[in-house]
Amino acid sequence: MSTPPVVLTVAGTDSGGAAGIAADLAAIGHLGCHGACVVTAVTAQDTTGVHAMHAVPIDVVDAQVGAVLDDLPVAVVKTGMLGTPTVVALVADRLGHLPLVVDPVLAATSGAVLGDGSVMDAYVQELLPRALVATPNHDEARVLTGRDDPPPDLAARLADLGCAVVLTGGPEWRPGRRATSCTDWVCLPGGRPEPLAHPAVATSADHGTGCTFASALAALLAHPLAETRGHCPHPDAGSPPADLTADVLVSACLRAAAYVTIQLTTSSTWRLGRGRGPVAHTPPAQPRHT
Ligand SMILES: Nc1ncnc2c1ncn2[C@@H]1O[C@H](COP(=O)(O)OP(=O)(O)O)[C@@H](O)[C@H]1O
Ligand SMILES: Cc1ncc(COP(=O)(O)O)c(N)n1
């Protein structure tokens, strides 16, 4: 195997191994990339909820970023739980010159708050305008825009901030409703929102799904982006991210959703935990994503 592209995840830990860094590194590795990680927060979490949180001191977050940037040719940065507006600002400042896939994590599947109003403001003002792609779910898109519009309108409004948007999920497949498909909405800045539908898996083991999808998308974008930018060990700070065409984004979204569907199908028969179980982080059963 030739040298893989590097995807850096900047996110929190989940002691239950479902969401956050655990999900990110599994998806990144399964999709042929090397995963580096910067830990922003430690959570005591399981399938039933978040029981405690500790924000990693900002100088330690900064030191982790410095160590990775000094040594590895990062092709794409994926962000998950950042936790505080200071960390959001640090990511914008230190990593904003790289292609950023921002999953604007504000809450856990269990409902626990992982980012308050000040984090939300920092996303809107500092990070989303510098992102290549944002992957909010429907609830996050409503909070970020302050509106209760249909998903395509929310996706277009967020894309006006300057990043491509993949608005995931939607009310039609929420737990308790029997939908057979999921629709994500993709919108590039200045473009029209387009629906991307794929089959829904009937499962309650979906903790970590959003992290897995965003990381899969980052890994699948890293392959074409690393080819464009080359494996330069120290990409120029300040150089703009490579252009992202609608074709490249849509293809990566479809393959990321196919990967998530395979993993959700695998874990749908598992019995792990007393709450919403983890999406599978075992190697994918079918190589359909490659
Ligand atoms: N039950 C499901 N079956 C198939 N795909 C799903 C299912 N639930 C979520 N997805 C897909 O997983 C990705 C992440 O979506 P979502 O669940 O909205 O993230 P989050 O965990 O942030 O709420 C999207 O592509 C969505 O369509
Ligand atoms: C550390 C961490 N990061 C992200 C999430 C969101 O994941 P999900 O929406 O699947 O609960 C989480 N629960 N914990």
Image (tube, rainbow, N blue to C red):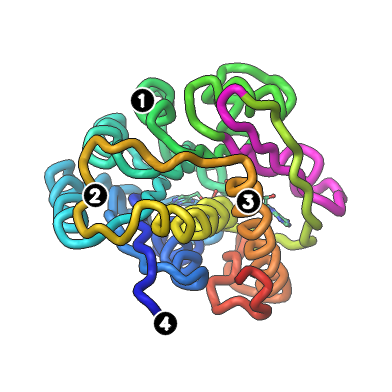
Of the residues shown, which amino acid type is indicated by label 4?
Met
Quarter of the N terminus within the rendering: bottom left
From mark 2 to mark 3, how far is it between C-alphas?
Answer: 26 Å
Name the N-terminal-most of marks 4 and 1.
4
Q: Describe the element under mark 4 as helix, strand or loop.
A: loop
Q: Which mark is residue 122?
A: 1
Mark with earlier residue (4, 3): 4
Query: In this rendering, is residue 159 above or below 58?
Result: above
Structural distance between the alpha carbons of marks 3 and 1: 26 Å
Q: Is residue 169 magenta?
A: yes
Disc number placed over residue 1 in the picture, else none: 4
| Residue 159, horizontal then vertical, whole percent | 56, 26
- Residue 236 placement, left or right of 63: right
Which x, y percent locates residue 269? Answer: 72, 75
Looking at the image, residue 35 sits to the left or right of residue 221; the answer is left
Q: Residue furthest top?
A: 147
Q: Closer to us: mark 4 or mark 1?
A: 4
Task: Work out whether residue 148 can be spotted.
Answer: yes
Residue count near mark 1 (Cα–Cα under 10 Å), binned few <14, some 14–19, many ≥20: some
Crowd tier of the residue under label 3, counting other residues whose Cα lies within 10 Å: few below 14, some 14–19, many 20 or above: many
Residue that numbered label 2 is attached to: 235
Q: CA distance from mark 1 to mark 2?
A: 26 Å
For the magenta stretch, what is the residue range?
165-190
226 sits to left or right of 59:
right
Amino acid bearing label 3:
Cys
